Amino acid sequence: MRRVRRGPRGYLRGAAGVGGVSASFSLGPALLFVPGDRPERLSKALERADAAILDLEDAVAPDAKAHARAELIAADPDPERVIVRVNGPETPDFALDLDALAETRVRRVMVAKAEDPAALARLEGYEVIALCETARGVVAAEQLAALPQVIALMWGAEDLVASLGGTSSRSDDGGYRDVARLARARVLLAAGAFGKQAIDAVHVDIADLDGLSDEARDAVTSGFTATACIHPGQVATIREAYAPPPEQVEWARGVLAAAEGERGVFRHEGRMIDEPILRHARSLVARAENA
């Protein structure tokens, strides 16, 4: 008989409602992909990163997917700190992946190449991260974010450009091309509009830690709550980027303290302070406390 067990909720906390993200990741910002057919790497990934994404999709060759599903069932990984990426709903592996997932305690699933909200109907009772990594997926980001079972959106650059018939998401200087930047912004806006989390894409150049640092800093200051990565050597760079500088935290606490005796707009250290600035300050303090 199949074991169907509910894992505890809590890694990606639910949002308060439309119009703003109410909570951040409780376990930190660095999410490390692990090949689904290499379960021996999972424990090390959980030692080094804040959470692991056990990948049944691109990291597993087609002829190894059945083996990867068997390994998932045998491992029955930690439901608190593991996300399982399943194959896209348009593939025959999608249903097989969900059948395997039901044999474990994990109820947090990342859906590769999410495009059609109706295709995620089977995932009621799961916490779903919709991976918008095709042209159709990015265009449908708002509809995906509106689903009650979706707790976060992530975007992916390489599959997106491939879906458009392109060959590279980046220019010669290493920066994203316009279409990738647009997709990144659209996924972030869709997540924020529906009070869901947003996860930034992986930086595929493993040796380029400076580039990763720049992108992770931009991600957190723009509103992303985590960055995915493909190598444990990237984790420390992501964590450092997401941790706010001490001087910013000191400023934020000073602003919030000053606001306690004020009503409406006021001046602090030569700067006009209103509610949006106070929200920025609260976010900085929250990030510091969760670091």
Image: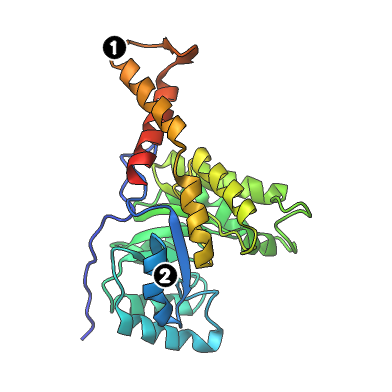
Q: In terms of image quadrants, where is residue 218?
A: top right
Instruction: Name the spot of residue 150 as percent of width and height, x first.
Output: 38, 54
- Where's residue 253, x and y in %? 35, 26
Q: In the depicted view, which residue is nearer to us: 133 or 147?
A: 133
Give SS at disc 1.
loop
What's the residue type where badge 2 is placed?
Ala
| Up-down relation of residue 196 to residue 43 (above or below) | above
Residue 110 got which mark?
Answer: none
Residue depicted at x 60% and y 60%: 134
Q: Tell me where residue 15 appears, x and y as whole percent.
A: 33, 43
Density class for disc 2 (Cα within 10 Å; few <14, some 14-19, many ≥20) is many
Name the residue at the right extreme: 172
Element carrying mark 2: helix
Image quadrant assignment for residue 286: top left
Q: Can residue 151 be spotted in the picture?
A: yes
Q: Disc 1 marks which residue?
A: 261
The amino acid pointed to by label 1 is: Gly
Q: Is residue 116 visible?
A: no
Q: Nearer the viewer, residue 163 or 211?
A: 211
Q: How many residues crowd around disc 1 within 10 Å: few (fewer than 14), some, or many (20 or more)?
A: few
* Colour convention: rainbow
Lower sequence index among marks 1 and 2 = 2
Residue at 44 percent across and 87 percent down: it is 66
Q: Residue furthest front?
A: 246
Residue annotated with mark 2:
45
Query: Does residue 254 lie above or below 41 as drawn?
Result: above
96 in relation to 137, above or below: below
